[in-house]
């Protein structure tokens, strides 16, 4: 039976909870809520486990902070025996307009430190990922403040629908595969 590892990237701690950089955590929290599962503390973070159409799924929120996410991903891949093509990483992207998603089956880290660490620890960049657009409405040199800043009121209003959309995309990946999911969800 194919197993899946869904990883939401973010930073632990209340001060980061509703920041743009934590969209990966928010997205997998919505997925877990939708599947009526719960996160519990475990090795390298919090995990939730459920079956979707008979496929075992482990959802991970690493507690290693964003820049060290690779250790948590590698641990759970090995522990659960999950092949690299069945992991799916959800993260933020400054180069996409707010709420737009883009999925790929491989690629560079695009300057994202969480993805960079995953690729370094796995020694591979061929894993599926979903980038959630957070926009780039910041002044030069203010990128860190922007990604670690809170959402605007307009974004907060739109977030529930977008998070539900991402959860649907993850479930589609698990059941229908990456190519079908990219065709149905990319750019929307």
Image: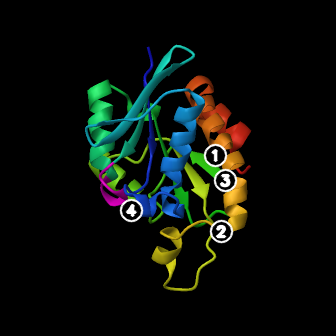
Instruction: Classify mark 2: residues with Cα within 10 Å, few (<14), some (14-19) or many (20+).
Output: few
Marks 3 and 4 in Cβ contact (< 8 Å): no
Helix, strand, or loop for circle 4?
helix
Magenta range is 63-68
Task: Tell me the number on the disc at residue 159.
Answer: 3
Foreground tag (1 vs 4): 1
On screen, residue 85 above or below 114: above
Sooner in the amino-acid sequence: mark 3 or mark 2: 2
**Residue 85 in picture, x, y percent from top left:** 45, 33
Determine which residue is flagged by label 2.
152
**Residue 129 in picture, x, y percent from top left:** 51, 45
Determine which residue is flagged by label 1.
163
Can residue 181 be seen by looking at this rendering? yes
CA–CA distance in space, label 1 to label 3: 6 Å
Helix, strand, or loop for circle 3?
helix
Sooner in the amino-acid sequence: mark 1 or mark 4: 4
Determine which residue is flagged by label 4.
113
Foreground tag (3 vs 4): 3
Helix, strand, or loop for circle 2?
loop
**Residue 60 in picture, x, y percent from top left:** 40, 39
Sooner in the amino-acid sequence: mark 4 or mark 2: 4
Instruction: Classify mark 3: residues with Cα within 10 Å, few (<14), some (14-19) or many (20+).
Output: some
Instruction: Classify mark 1: residues with Cα within 10 Å, few (<14), some (14-19) or many (20+).
Output: many
- Kindly identify the residue that appears in the image at 53 percent across and 48 percent down: 26
């Amino acid at each position: 039976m194919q197993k899946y590892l869904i990883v939401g990237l973010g930073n632990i701690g209340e001060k980061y909870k509703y920041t743009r950089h934590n969209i990966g955590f928010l997205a997998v929290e919505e997925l877990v809520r939708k599947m009526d599962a719960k996160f519990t503390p475990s090795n390298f973070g919090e995990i939730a486990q459920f079956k979707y159409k008979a496929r075992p799924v482990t959802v991970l929120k690493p507690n290693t902070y964003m820049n060290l996410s690779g250790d948590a991903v590698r641990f759970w891949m090995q522990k659960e025996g999950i092949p690299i093509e069945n992991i799916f990483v959800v993260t933020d992207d400054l180069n996409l307009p707010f709420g737009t998603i883009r999925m790929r089956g491989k690629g560079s880290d695009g300057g994202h430190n969480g993805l960079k660490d995953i690729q370094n620890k796995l020694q591979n960049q061929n894993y599926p990922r979903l980038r959630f657009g957070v926009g780039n409405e910041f002044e030069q040199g203010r990128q860190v403040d922007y990604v670690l800043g809170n959402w605007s009121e307009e974004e907060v209003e739109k977030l529930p629908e977008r998070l539900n959309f991402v959860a649907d995309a993850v479930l589609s990946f698990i059941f229908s595969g990456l190519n079908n999911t990219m065709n149905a969800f990319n750019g929307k």
